[in-house]
Image (tube, rainbow, N blue to C red):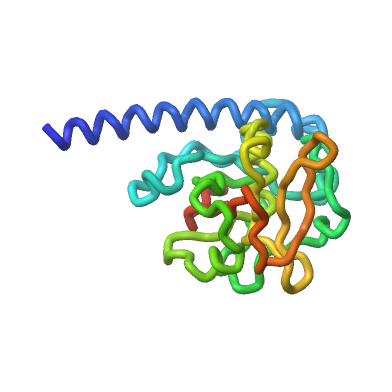
Amino acid sequence: MLGIMVEVQQTALNIVHERSYARQAEDLAYYFAGELKMSRWQYLDTLPVFTPQPENYQGRFDILLLVQTPQPKLPLQRILDIVGLQYNPDVLTARDWAGSRFVTPEKAYLTYVEDGTGNLDTKPNIVRQNLSADERAGTLLDGTFLHVSDRGLVTRHYLDLPGSQVASGCVPYLCLWNGGPRFGCGWDGYAPPNSGSVVAGDKVVTK
């Protein structure tokens, strides 16, 4: 009986994720297909296929996220402009955290994440130190598309993104500035009030 209940719950969760995937795919096509000189269908064909949430992520990384990566015809600055994010110019120099095993893929990717609520008021460098073997720290791009997927998120709490670094000791963060969402960067040993570091599962799908 328990096995049947678990299977039913998993099926229901897959349906939720499939719907989220379809919505996000259409949003990304709306934003980026024309910019990349593609039709809607051509763009959708570049996205990774829907992949169910790994069982060991359940209860930890329950948010499916589609992420468009920078391209020669679509640099990071243009991505941020298109989706309506302000930014400190230093953020445009962000790169993968030097101590991470994760390397941002060249293609759009699918990932499962949490939105920082599990790490509220915790220093980003402490979050990095405590990652499990199947976890990675959320990046600037993860934060960007969490915002695209949930426009109200940053009104509830700010996001630290310790999977990326600016210079040697700073991390990007997403906050509200003059009434709008804005990327800044700050010392990774400081935990701003009501801010949480995004963490994700280490598996990503690119096709």
Identify whether 191 is placed above or below 82.
below
Q: Residue placed at 15% from the left, 35% from the top?
A: 2
Q: Residue furthest front?
A: 193
**Can you say which quadrant of the picture contains the C terminus?**
top right
Left or right of 109 on screen, residue 58: left
How many numbered marks appear? 0
Residue 124 against residue 206 in the figure, above or below: below
Measuring from the top left, give residue 54's x and y in whole percent. Answer: 38, 47
Query: Can see residue 60?
Result: yes
Q: Nearer the viewer, residue 139 or 180?
A: 180
The residue shown at (48%, 67%) is 130
- The N terminus lies in quadrant: top left
Locate residue 179: give its quadrant: top right
Q: Residue at x 71, y 53 (%)?
A: 173
In the image, 143: left or right of 39?
left
| Farthest left residue in view | 1
* Residue located 53% across and 32% down the image: 21
Examine the rendered structure and indicate whether residue 82 appears above or below residue 184.
above
Describe residue 43's horizontal placement relative to residue 71 as left or right. Answer: left
Task: Note whether residue 46 is visible.
Answer: no
In this view, the residue in front, 6 or 119, is 119
Task: Answer with left or right where residue 72 lies relative to residue 189.
Answer: right
- Judging depth in this view, the residue of 91 and 72 nearest the camera is 91
Which of the 4 quarters of the picture holds residue 163? bottom right
In the image, residue 189 sits, relative to residue 185, either above or below, namely below
x and y percentages locating residue 118 in the rendered image: 49, 50
Rendering coords of residue 91 (x, y %):
81, 56
Q: Residue 18 location, x and y as percent?
A: 47, 29
